[in-house]
Amino acid sequence: MSDLLLERLGTSWGALQALFCMAAATYLCRLGGVWLMDHLPPSPRLRRALGALPGSIIISTVVPLGVMGGSAALVALAVAMLVMFKLRRDVLALVAGMVTVALLRQMGL
Amino acid sequence: MRLTLPLLPGIMVFGAAFGAGAAHKGLSLFEAMLSSGLVFAGAAQLVSLALWQDHWTFGSTLAITLVVFAINARMILMGAALHHWFKTASPMWRWFSLYLFTDANWILGVRYHQDGGRDYGMFVGSGVLLWLVWLLVTVPGYLLGALVPDPKTWGIDLVMPIIFAVMLIPLWKGKQAALPWLVAAVVSIVVMQAVQGYAFIVVGALAGALTGAFMPEAQADV
């Protein structure tokens, strides 16, 4: 690629390198866990760790983000989980949570 | 697939917000689309804008790469958690399709698995749809700039946390889940307060998984 072409596209070698490195780092994360599990010897302990993993990932994402998001976020999360618990309808629960947070944020919470 | 659709409006606003932020920061449309198409990870892309440079040095390239890696390190654990599903695809297909791995199709995959689904096409189909939408909305976001609403005003920033929280309910399998989850909650909050950035996800999740590993067999074996 000539420098002229890069200029036409509105970019530079430096920017392309940065974007490529960011993409490579992200792809490495996408592959990393699956690759790791291919190479770790299976054991009952590992199996139990993996069993607890999805819930732990969800909790570790949702709880701090909810705390950071303030009262509107916490109420919306609670509403969404309550709807899911009572009705077992995931789409409905998502909509209920989103409507709640939108209303609360519009009210300035 | 059915579940990907209700997530799309929120994801579209998010992608458009990245496009608007990229325009504001002085990226070209080409660069913004490369970021959406190649990196394809919302939180990392948004944070990377704060580190974007007009003139790149080795140091600034390294810094932006490390920050992106730190934000996306959660995907290492997510991939491990769904490993048995990814294993059903042939190696070539698996390495290609993992490129489409996002928070959204991960959480939908977890749910799908809970319901007994094993079709790998669900992951790929949802991933392709998300990638196309994400790439396309970058353009209007970039061009409309200031017209794109701040995701925070309507709570769009909470789409992923809310769907995560909703999916937690069917994962509850009785009391044996309580201790790992409690540990994950406490550790992630402590880490969030103590360390900047997104380390709380990885550290909290690892703490929860470790707790699960050392719990009695009969209980965890569901």
Image (tube, helix red, strand yellow):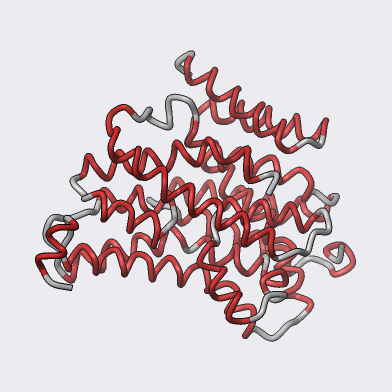
Q: Which residue appears at 65% of the width and 60% of the height?
A: B123
Q: Which residue appears at 39% of the width and 69% of the height?
A: A25
Q: Determine whether, in the image, residue B69 is placed left or right of residue B65.
A: right
Q: Which residue appears at 28% of the width and 37% of the height?
A: B143
Residue B216: x %, y % from top left = 83, 67
The image quarter in which residue A56 lies = bottom right
How many dots with numbers?
Answer: 0
Q: Determine whether, in the image, residue B165 is placed left or right of residue B102.
A: right
Q: Nearer the viewer, residue B160 or A73?
A: B160
Q: Is residue A61 above or below residue A45?
A: above
Q: Is residue A60 above or below residue A15?
A: above
Q: Which residue appears at 63% of the width and 29% of the height?
A: A97
Residue B102: x %, y % from top left = 54, 56
Q: Nearer the viewer, residue B216 or B199?
A: B199
Residue B167: x %, y % from top left = 71, 45
Screen quadrant of the N terminus of chain A: bottom left
Q: Determine whether, in the image, residue B82 is placed left or right of residue B25.
A: right
